[in-house]
Image (cartoon, rainbow, N blue to C red):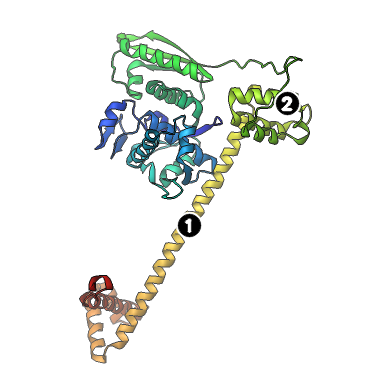
């Protein structure tokens, strides 16, 4: 599967959406309520999600992102398991369904602590609205909560999470620390935090620096092995015996690759569909050039198809001449990432407009249904009033007057502006009540099933 950067709301990196203790989570089948610091409440009606569930959710978000933040997804279970590096055993299929049950039963509440980059607000939402498996095709249909997807389309308080790195980390502690570091290094190269606050953020059971620091160091070592971004960790003591964790971010050196093969070694293009897609992205005149194929394939093996594709698109757009050196520089420095982020922002605008149009259409449909029902009720009421004798109609008018407020009654008695409309509406409301009472008193007609 190609490497992908998944856009994630920073609030979901600051506050955990999943839990590290897999044994405790598996035993909590009746659910739990957990409060993390002030202003964040996590409710799970079933087993709380853990690292495996976080991988599944990030994958589904990636699929939604690829399709313009589509709320409803249709995928095969095999595709999900394969792309999340799980086998296709019965146990894995069962685990995927269990994961969907978990996310379906999660409710998140921010009590004045949800930050959109400008202000803090209160918000309450779910993650997944529904999911189902088609009886014949076995395709999986997943529907995200509209509020959850809407947050993904919100203003620019986001960070890109590399899906390949995320699932490769394995360790729940390293994965959770990876989320926190992604958020905390938003626009900076150094970051400091006390061990006590770090334990609270993760969260960790340990409360003493002597226990916290070794685990954080182990987690950092794992992150450094599994990701392109490297973190240097140092500690220092401050007043009252507290220990501060000092993180510094560096990026792994991207060494130039030996693009030229030895003369006696023939160059072969790997027979992979993703390679074919990448080659087809190249300008037609470049699709037969070995000196282009070599770096494309080398970076595909090292960085993945998405990385290479965005840099080919960047080069196609910007290289006026010297295509090959331009492409090499783009691949070395990932120039295409900024262009991809701009395209992503444009897709968000389109998706937001589509969602807004859908909301307007739904609102108009509801209003149209309400008006139609109102017109039908008015016709029924008028037909009922017309069917009454003159005396019964006079009694109805007296009853309508008696039910009016003093202000409206005064307008009707003085035959002021709109008095006739007000009287008719009052009479029609009583007529509708009588029609409902008549219908309720009618005996139920037996159906064929009841008669049998």
Q: Depth check: 59 or 189 in front?
A: 59
Judged left or right of residue 89, residue 209 is left
Considering only vertical position in the picture, is 122 above or below 184? Answer: below
Say which quadrant the C terminus sits in.
bottom left
Q: Are marks 2 and 1 in contact (CB under 8 Å)?
A: no
Q: Quadrant of residue 392?
A: bottom left
Q: Give the x, y percent position of residue 269.
A: 68, 27
Q: Secondary structure at mark 1?
A: helix
> How would you rate the neighbour count of disc 2 (Cα within 10 Å): few for under 14, some for 14-19, many for 20 or more?
some
Q: Give the x, y percent position of residue 334.
A: 62, 25
Considering only vertical position in the picture, is 191 above or below 53? Answer: above
Q: Give the x, y percent position of residue 359.
A: 46, 54
The label number, if any, that marks residue 292 in the structure image = 2
Q: Depth check: 416 or 330 in front?
A: 330
Check disc 1 and report the residue beneath it.
360
Q: Give the x, y percent position of residue 221.
A: 45, 14
Q: Quadrant of residue 114?
A: top left
Residue at 74 percent of width and 30 percent of height: 319
Considering only vertical position in the picture, is 244 above or below 413? Answer: above
Answer whether residue 259 is visible to the viewer in this image: yes
- In the rendered structure, which disc, 2 or 1, sits on the residue that comes first in sequence? 2
Q: Secondary structure at mark 2?
A: helix
């Amino acid at each position: 599967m190609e490497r992908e950067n998944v856009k994630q709301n920073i609030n979901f990196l600051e506050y955990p959406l999943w839990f590290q203790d897999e044994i405790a989570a598996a035993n909590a089948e009746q659910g739990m309520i957990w409060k993390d610091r002030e202003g964040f409440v996590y409710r799970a009606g079933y087993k709380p999600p853990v690292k495996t569930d976080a991988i599944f959710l990030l994958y589904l978000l990636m699929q939604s992102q690829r399709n313009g933040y589509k709320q409803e997804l249709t995928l095969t279970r095999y595709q999900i398991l394969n792309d999340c590096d799980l086998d296709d055993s019965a146990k894995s299929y069962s685990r995927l369904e269990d994961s969907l049950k978990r996310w379906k039963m999660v409710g998140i509440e921010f009590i004045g602590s949800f930050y959109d980059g400008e202000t803090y607000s209160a918000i309450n939402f779910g993650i997944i609205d529904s999911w189902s498996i088609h009886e014949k095709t076995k395709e999986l249909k997943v529907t995200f909560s509209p509020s959850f997807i809407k947050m993904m389309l919100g203003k620019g308080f986001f960070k890109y999470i590399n899906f390949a790195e995320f699932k490769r980390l394995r360790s729940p502690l390293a994965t959770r620390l990876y989320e926190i570091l992604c958020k905390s290094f938003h626009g900076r190269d150094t970051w400091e935090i006390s061990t006590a606050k770090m334990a609270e953020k993760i969260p960790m059971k340990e409360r003493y620096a002597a226990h916290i620091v070794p685990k954080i160091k182990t987690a950092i070592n794992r992150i450094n092995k599994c990701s392109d971004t490297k973190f240097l960790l140092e500690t220092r003591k401050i007043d009252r015996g507290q220990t501060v964790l000092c993180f510094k971010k560096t990026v792994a050196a991207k060494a130039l690759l030996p693009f030229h093969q030895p003369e006696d070694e023939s160059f072969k293009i790997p027979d992979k569909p993703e390679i074919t897609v990448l080659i087809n992205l190249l300008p037609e005149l470049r699709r037969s050039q070995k000196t282009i194929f070599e770096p494309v394939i080398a970076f595909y093996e090292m960085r993945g198809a998405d990385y290479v594709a965005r840099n080919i698109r960047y080069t196609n757009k910007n290289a006026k001449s010297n295509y090959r050196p331009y492409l090499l520089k783009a691949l070395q420095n990932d120039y295409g990432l900024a262009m991809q982020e701009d395209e992503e922002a444009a897709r968000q605008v389109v998706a937001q407009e589509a969602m807004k149009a859908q909301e307007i259409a739904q609102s108009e449909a509801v209003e149209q249904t309400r008006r139609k029902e109102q017109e039908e009720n008015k016709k029924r009421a008028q037909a009922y009033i017309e069917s009454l004798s003159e005396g019964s109609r006079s009694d109805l008018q007296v009853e309508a007057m008696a039910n009016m407020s003093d202000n409206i009654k005064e307008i009707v008695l003085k035959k002021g502006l709109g008095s006739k409309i007000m009287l008719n509406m009052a009479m029609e409301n009583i007529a509708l009540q009588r029609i409902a009472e008549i219908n309720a008193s009618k005996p139920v007609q037996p159906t064929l099933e009841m008669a049998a």
